[in-house]
């Protein structure tokens, strides 16, 4: 719903134009009529002039009323003609701009007199023809680029499957390419919210110290100048949270070999492979400590044993008391060495457990691996008939197969079991993996003994136990005898793996949009610079954001409860680099607001407060231009938190609401849903912070060519155009 202030501003502007045109037309008509009357009066004979004056003078009031009536009729006729032949073509012109620059499938509705309808049909036919030609051209382009696209997909698949993080940046440290492993490595190392610091177009210096990276870059470039065959570098750095990251850095040589001095190759960018090696460091340190402890602690025992053996060898006929004392010394020291060796073995087994990689896999595949192992190593036939193929578990398949193999080995060797079968089913959030045999029955004590015995099967011995493996997996094992129904079995209770994925198709909630907000001047932001003003809109980096709040009154105590944002880099919408965070407002939500955005007080309980969220969001949108619909509303909420948090959003701001009024001043509505429909954009999640941010970003991308068609090409041009609309509304 439009605010009264906005509607009043637009109405006054359009009405003023119409009134001025109407006054000019009526003045012209009245002047022509008076001139005709005067000319007729002037050509009459004097006596006829007197007669005419005597005849008309008593009827002056009637003549004036007839004149006013004629002017009123002319004014009404002018208004109808103005509405049909002035406003109509303006709407057609706006529709043509939309077709040309934003939404080729848009068609202008037939309205107005027959002549304008014929023009509208011709424009729609031309648009249909143009869209057909465009589709043909696009099909040819797609066909011509199919091989390139295939290579790009292969590269993307390769990047996503790499076990190491890969990141590419240009010489200035701007990130050009990265994979999910790199995001995880830096996100896990730098603390909460840090994964938002890695993204296309972002500076890598937010992740790695600038001086360190520049030093390594200079070293690589020096090797390039010398023509060394392998001008790479490797270094390890420590993050703010004490994590160790190993980086292998290689140059991306410029395509032109003569770009450097004297034909020397130069680096246009750098390829970095990153790996978090904190755990490896800790394991190595623990191993060194264990070895050192065992070595240092063994020296005294070995010295005592050696001395006792020498005394027994030198004096074989010593007194029985001395002989027994030396034997006792040897026994005690050997016992101490045995205890230390046992402790070392146990600690090393713990270190082995921390190295296990747990991967998501189908339960049926894990059973197939265990089945092959049992049939190959133990020679037992195995059935797998009762398997649910849809169940996924997160396991280390090798150690899990070792556990099942060890249990099967015990059953065969100690109880003569000659046949096994598997079953896999789901019980709530638990996957039940059953190892079944036809008999005999066992006791619970047997299972306890096997659970804490070392894994031995098929000629393989391990330091681990069944309990160790299950503990690492967060699993349990139980024995079900024949009394439980069916043959005896071991049941492994494994957690169900259900990876959480973002729901892109969130339900649409309809309701009134927030009122348009104009009490905050966006046109004098401290971060605005002349350099930015002269930058083309298509070359800037944007953060398009939206907020949901407890109510509509920022100055009245309402608070932010959700922030959603997405980035635009090089005129591309980066959906994968979105930001979304719920915020605990520490106050109840207005019931009316809750019906609009659907966020309840329970959903916000335990979420971070705005003091914790704003620094993260500031890092996310640093060095970008902010874009929002009805931006002053969202910016007002951010401004209210400046003093309390010390976070100041000084970036330039663009408002798609004002830009829509710049582009389409003759349209009745500039609500987000209406603009999206006008530009052919599907609204997926209205009144959801991230959903509205995505829609606003799509709208802004469609607006950029429309603005260029009107000569608005740079950030400064867009801000100046917005300011004119803002001034009309304000005054």
Image (spheres, rainbow, N blue to C red):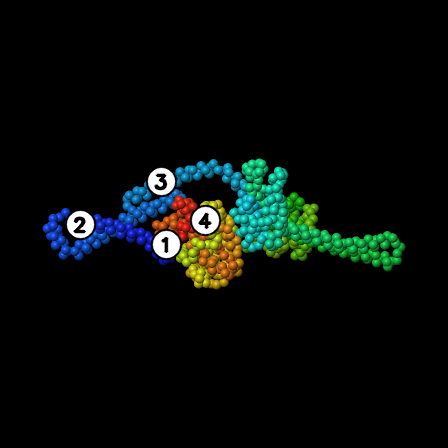
CB atoms at circles 3 and 2 under 8 Å apart?
no
Q: Residue visible at 56% across and 45% down?
A: 167
Q: Nearer the observer, disc 1 or disc 4?
A: 4
Earlier sequence position, callout 1 versus callout 2: 2
CB atoms at circles 4 and 2 under 8 Å apart?
no
Where disc 3 sits, the SS reads helix
Q: Residue visible at 58% across and 53% down?
A: 190
Residue bearing the label numbered 1: 728
Earlier sequence position, callout 3 versus callout 2: 2
Earlier sequence position, callout 3 versus callout 4: 3
Q: Residue visible at 31% across and 48% down?
A: 87
Quarter in which the N terminus is drawn: bottom left
Quarter in which the C terminus is drawn: bottom left
**Can you see residue 230?**
yes
For the residues marked 3 and 2, what is the alpha-carbon distance in whole angstroms?
Answer: 52 Å
Which image quadrant is residue 128 in? top left
For the residues marked 1 and 2, what is the alpha-carbon distance in whole angstroms?
Answer: 44 Å
Residue bearing the label numbered 2: 38
CB atoms at circles 3 and 4 under 8 Å apart?
no
Earlier sequence position, callout 1 versus callout 4: 4
Looking at this view, is 712 or 311 the one in front?
712
User: Residue 370: where, in percent of width, then height?
Assistant: 62, 47
Residue bearing the label numbered 3: 126
For the residues marked 1 and 4, what is the alpha-carbon distance in whole angstroms?
Answer: 22 Å
Where disc 4 sits, the SS reads helix
Residue bearing the label numbered 4: 533
Dot 1 crowding, Cα within 10 Å, few <14, some 14–19, many 20+: some
* Residue at the left extreme, as displayed: 47
User: Residue 155: where, in percent of width, then height?
Assistant: 54, 41
**Can you see residue 249?**
no
């Amino acid at each position: 719903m439009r605010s009264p202030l906005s509607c009043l501003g637009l109405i006054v502007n359009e009405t003023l134009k119409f009134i001025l045109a109407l006054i000019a037309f009526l003045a012209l008509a009245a002047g022509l009529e008076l001139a005709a009357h005067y000319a007729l009066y002037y050509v009459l004979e004097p006596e006829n002039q007197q007669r005419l004056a005597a005849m008309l003078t008593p009827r002056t009031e009637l003549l004036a009323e007839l004149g006013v009536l004629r002017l009123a009729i002319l004014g009404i006729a002018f208004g109808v003609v103005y509405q049909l032949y002035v406003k109509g073509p303006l709407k057609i012109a706006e529709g043509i701009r939309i077709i040309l620059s934003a939404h080729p499938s848009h068609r202008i509705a037939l309205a107005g007199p027959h002549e304008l309808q014929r023009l509208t049909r011709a424009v729609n036919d031309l648009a249909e023809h143009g869209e057909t030609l465009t589709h043909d051209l696009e099909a040819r382009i797609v066909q011509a680029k199919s091989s390139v696209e295939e290579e790009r997909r292969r590269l993307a698949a390769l990047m996503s499957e790499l076990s190491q993080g890969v990141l590419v940046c240009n010489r200035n440290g701007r990130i050009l390419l990265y994979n999910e492993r790199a995001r995880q490595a830096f996100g896990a190392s730098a603390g909460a919210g840090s994964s938002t610091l890695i993204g296309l177009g972002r500076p890598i210096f937010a992740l790695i110290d600038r001086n360190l990276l520049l030093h390594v870059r200079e070293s690589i470039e020096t090797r390039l100048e010398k023509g060394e065959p392998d001008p790479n570098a490797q270094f390890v750095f420590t993050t703010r949270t004490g994590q160790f990251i190993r980086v292998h850095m290689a140059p991306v040589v410029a395509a032109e070999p003569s770009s450097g001095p004297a034909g020397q190759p130069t680096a246009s960018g750098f390829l970095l492979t990153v790996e978090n090696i904190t755990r490896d460091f800790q394991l190595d340190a623990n191993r060194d400590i264990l070895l050192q402890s065992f070595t240092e602690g063994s020296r005294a025992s070995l010295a005592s044993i050696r001395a006792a053996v020498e005394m027994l060898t030198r004096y074989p006929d010593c007194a029985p008391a001395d002989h027994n004392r030396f034997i006792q010394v040897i026994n005690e020291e050997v016992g101490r060495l045995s205890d230390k060796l046992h402790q070392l073995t146990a600690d090393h087994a713990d270190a082995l457990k921390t190295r296990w990689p747990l991967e998501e896999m189908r339960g049926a595949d894990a059973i197939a691996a265990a089945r092959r192992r049992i049939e190959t190593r133990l020679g037992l036939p195995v059935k797998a008939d009762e398997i649910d193929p849809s169940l996924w578990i997160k396991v280390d398949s090798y150690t899990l197969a070792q556990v099942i193999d060890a249990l099967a080995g015990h059953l065969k060797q100690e109880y003569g079991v000659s046949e096994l079968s598997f079953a896999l089913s789901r019980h709530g959030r638990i996957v039940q993996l059953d190892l079944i045999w036809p008999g005999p029955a066992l006791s619970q004590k047997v299972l306890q003994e096997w659970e804490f015995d070392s894994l031995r099967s098929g000629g393989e011995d391990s330091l681990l136990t069944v309990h160790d493996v299950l503990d690492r997996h967060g699993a349990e094992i139980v024995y079900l005898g024949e009394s439980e129904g069916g043959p005896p079995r071991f049941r492994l209770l494994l957690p169900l793996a259900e990876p959480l994925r973002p729901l892109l198709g969130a339900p649409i909630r309809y309701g009134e949009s927030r009122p348009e907000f104009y009490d905050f001047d966006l046109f004098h932001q401290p971060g605005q610079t002349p350099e930015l003003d002269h930058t083309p809109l298509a070359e800037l980096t944007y953060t398009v954001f939206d907020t949901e709040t407890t109510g509509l009154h920022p100055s009245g105590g309402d608070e932010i409860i959700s922030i959603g944002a997405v980035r635009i880099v090089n005129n591309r919408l980066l959906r994968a680099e979105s930001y979304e965070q719920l915020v605990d407002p520490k106050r109840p939500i207005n019931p009316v607001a809750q019906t609009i955005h659907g966020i309840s007080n329970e959903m916000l309980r335990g979420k971070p407060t705005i003091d914790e969220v704003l620094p993260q969001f500031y890092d996310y949108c640093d060095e970008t231009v902010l874009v929002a619909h009805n931006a002053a509303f969202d910016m007002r909420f951010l401004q209210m938190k400046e003093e309390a948090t010390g976070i100041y959003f000084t970036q330039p701001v663009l408002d798609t609401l004002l830009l829509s009024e710049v582009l389409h001043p003759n349209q009745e509505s500039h609500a987000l849903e209406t603009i999206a429909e006008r530009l052919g954009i599907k609204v997926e999640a209205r009144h959801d912070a991230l959903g509205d941010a995505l829609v606003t970003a799509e709208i802004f991308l469609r607006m950029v060519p429309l603005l260029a068609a009107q000569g608005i090409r740079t950030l400064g041009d867009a801000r100046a155009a917005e300011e004119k609309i803002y001034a009309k509304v304000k005054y």
